[in-house]
Amino acid sequence: MNGAVNSMDDLSPGELDDFRRDVRAWLEANCPDSMRTPASDEDEVVWGGSQVSFKTEDHRLWFERMRDKGWFTPQWPTEYGGGGLSSEQAGILAREMARLHCRQPQINLGIWMLGPVLLEFGTQEQKQTHLPPMARGEVRWCQGFSEPNAGSDLASLQMKAVPDGDDFIVTGSKIWTSHADKSDAIYTLVRTDPEAKKQEGISFLLIDMASPGITTKPIELISGKSHFCEVFFDQVRVPQKNLVGELNSGWTVAKRLMQHERQAMAHLGDEGQSPYSLADMAKQYLGCRAAEAGAADSDATEIADAVMRDRVAALDMDDMAYKLTLRRAAEEIAAGDDALATTSTFKYYSTELEKRKNEALMAILGTRALGWDGGLSDEAGGSFTADELAVTRGWLSSKVMSIGGGTTEIQLNVIAKRVLGLPSADDSA
Amino acid sequence: MNLTLNEEQRYLKDTARSFFREKAPVAALRKLRDSKDELGYSPELWREIVELGWSGMLFPETVNGIEIGGSGFGFKGLGAILQESGHTLTASPLLSSVVLGGSAILLGGSEAQQQAYLPDLISGEVRYALALEEGAHHDPAACAMTATPTANGYRLSGRKTFVLDGHSAERLIVVARTAGSAGERAGLSLFLVDADTAGITRTRTPMIDSRAAADMHFDAVEVTREQVLGTADGGFALLEQVLDRGRICIAAEMLGSTRELFDRTLAYLKERQQFGVPIGSFQALQHRMATVFTEIELAKSTVLAALSALDEDSNRVPLLASLAKHKVSAVYELMSNEAVQLHGGIGVTDALDIGLFLKRARVAQQTFGDSAFHRRRFARLCGY
Ligand SMILES: Cc1cc2nc3c(=O)[nH]c(=O)nc-3n(C[C@H](O)[C@H](O)[C@H](O)COP(=O)(O)OP(=O)(O)OC[C@H]3O[C@@H](n4cnc5c(N)ncnc54)[C@H](O)[C@@H]3O)c2cc1C
């Protein structure tokens, strides 16, 4: 998705039209109907990797068909298992998929974050070793950056890697590592020069999660789920050929990776959007009344509570404005303009908007959103419906997106300094 | 829908940018204000705008074979010009006469009316104003002014307020009620009336933005049936179409002003020193600027989407007009307040231009419906 490698020359508008027609026809024929609706639940999402599992046969079909097209990684070169599409073509593919409401056939952070970085900084051998399995959804990667004392101030990280023959010996711990317990490999930042200025003693290292000395411990979240872990490294032996970029220049690689991460988070945020319509929920829980003149149709109704109606409209409008802005950015990039800026803007806005929408849903459901457990099933007259419980969990989950991938405050720092050119008082962006 | 400008539109935007900066900088508005100028804009500037062809952009070249002087260039082009005029707070009859008056005639007029009225409007010789509002809030259906049937037409009686450029326009588009009662959509009609018709009194109302608006009193003003634009009693739909064009165009102007305030404030944050450092190095201020920046980017997308919908004659125009007017009004309010605060003491002085933007902001916000009006309308259009 982000591998900005154009393996095809610019195509004429006519050729692009042909491409669009072919893509549309292929998607119509190959995307199962059940994969043309949003994933309703977490277990509907397919995570690529050695432990990949499919809830239904349609999930598997869709995964395999897209994989065989090379369309997990449409813009990667075909020699690394990619689709070899130009950015225009990839844009067309994305739009055609959106048009049919096709789901992502899999989610794979390796592809979105590590892949583009390897394409840019990796050795030929690293690319050949790591990219094709990633493009086929066979290896699941996790990100080992944060440490207990290195969060926003990531460069202060302490996990150390000491050279030993052809290897490094890695010792220390990582925290908040999403899906570490389910991953095949981890890309890490390690300290290789404790004497240097903090950004200048860091290296970027790929580690096999099956290596002896690694243990993971899941952390339970407020939502009751557990998707991230503590990861402990006890004298873990890692081949030096797994170093990406130069020794002690890992910070440069990491900064680039974090740009891709912001994009992916904004993207995941869009995927992870609450599936509930605020307006429908408000009508259901707060009641409705006959609409005033000029509504869409004559027996239309409106949300009875005028205050909530206004709040819902404001949120829907912000949502629409945000989506238009994503679209404008895509058009500007396609036109070769300086794109308005910044993945930071999107990451910050989309995650904050999602929190606001979830708070509105909580207010709309009132005490119906306060249940932790259904107790009994719906049919048996359980106290909370599945939808109600999903709203509650969705609300709790919405809190994480504005923290992971660089907090809102850090994104605002980045906008202020990099986009607006405001002077720095410190090095916090 | 396309949210970027093409080559030609971009060129136009650049031309407009230099034109307004050179011919009508904010200092020109200050001068008009200080000299208590009656018109509220410069007639020489208006002539130049007409010569540049900007008054004809929304109109076709011909109406059934008769040349009317339009260029068919479209809304995105005009929007780019208005956006630039917002950077300099330039007043002109582009909005009142061309967008509102012109759209009413183009969308509601018969072929004969279009051929008769549009050429003078486009050439700038005859200026129009829309006499609609009657109360403290924009509310088209609330119109109570009566148009009582007579032997060969109607008799108009009632009051209008906040008629933009109303005291200087030669011709008026008057909204009045031929049936029903205030609050109802049905029963409204639009009339084309010469401003000097007997029974009309106009008073200029000095406004905070130093532009011209007028209160009007219609005392048994006689009009003929031929002066009706569109269909009698069914004027509401036409009026909404005209207003949506006005809403989107003024949103474009407001976007320019908002961005200008942002740029000026950003520059000040980099230059003003306190505690031995530029005030822009304070994180409390950085985050406020980053937040408004993001909001302005969002607002810009809504304006471009709405202009593009007008050019495509899309059925999403009403929805996008409300989206744009809501979003831009809210962001302009936020930015104008931030601009004053972040300038400190000098921000509340008349010597600094920021105050002029603040004042224009509130007038523009109220024009054709404020943020709250458009949130209500958006909800209604979405079916909730
Ligand atoms: C869902 C989720 C998934 C994650 N996945 C991973 C992962 O896979 N791999 C990984 O390595 N990490 C992961 N993280 C960790 C994440 O990157 C960190 O949580 C994040 O960088 C913040 O660090 P912290 O938690 O230590 O908070 P802190 O940095 O201690 O921040 C605390 C508060 O201080 C504010 N703050 C800090 N510095 C500044 C500043 N300079 N200016 C203004 N405010 C500031 C922050 O915005 C925040 O509000 C994940 C986190 C979450 C929530």
Image (tube, coloured by chain):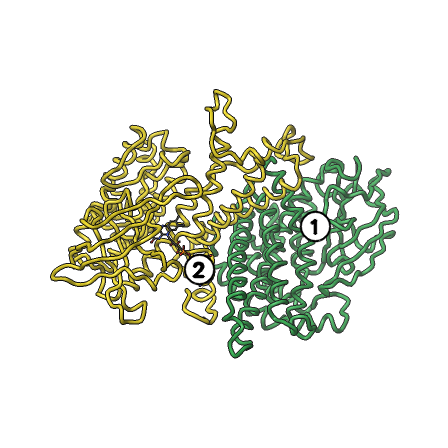
Chain colours: A yellow, B green
Chain under callout 1: B
Closest to the observer, B127 or A175: A175
| Residue, disc 1 | B116
Crowd rating for badge 2 (residues with CA inside 10 Å; few <14, some 14–19, many 20+): many
User: In the shown orientation, is residue A131 left or right of residue A276?
Assistant: left
Label 2 near ligand 1 (CB < 8 Å):
yes
| Lateral position of residue A114 relative to residue B113, left or right | left
Q: Is residue A389 above or below residue A404?
A: above
| Quadrant of the displayed image that contains ligand 1 | bottom left
Circles 2, 1 touching at the beta carbon (< 8 Å): no
Q: Residue at x 35, y 40 (%)?
A: A104
Q: Nearer the viewer, mark 2 or mark 1?
A: 2
> Residue at point 54% right, 39% down?
A361
User: Does the rendering let one see residue B106?
Assistant: no
Chain label for disc 2: A
The image quarter in which residue A292 lies: top right
Residue underneath mark 2: A410
Q: Which residue, as the protein is rendered here, is positioned at the far top? A: A380
Going by the numbered disc 1, the residue's amino acid type is: Ala
Q: Position of residue B225 (x, y in %)?
A: 79, 41
**C-alpha distance separating marks 2 and 1:** 61 Å
Q: Residue furthest front?
A: A234
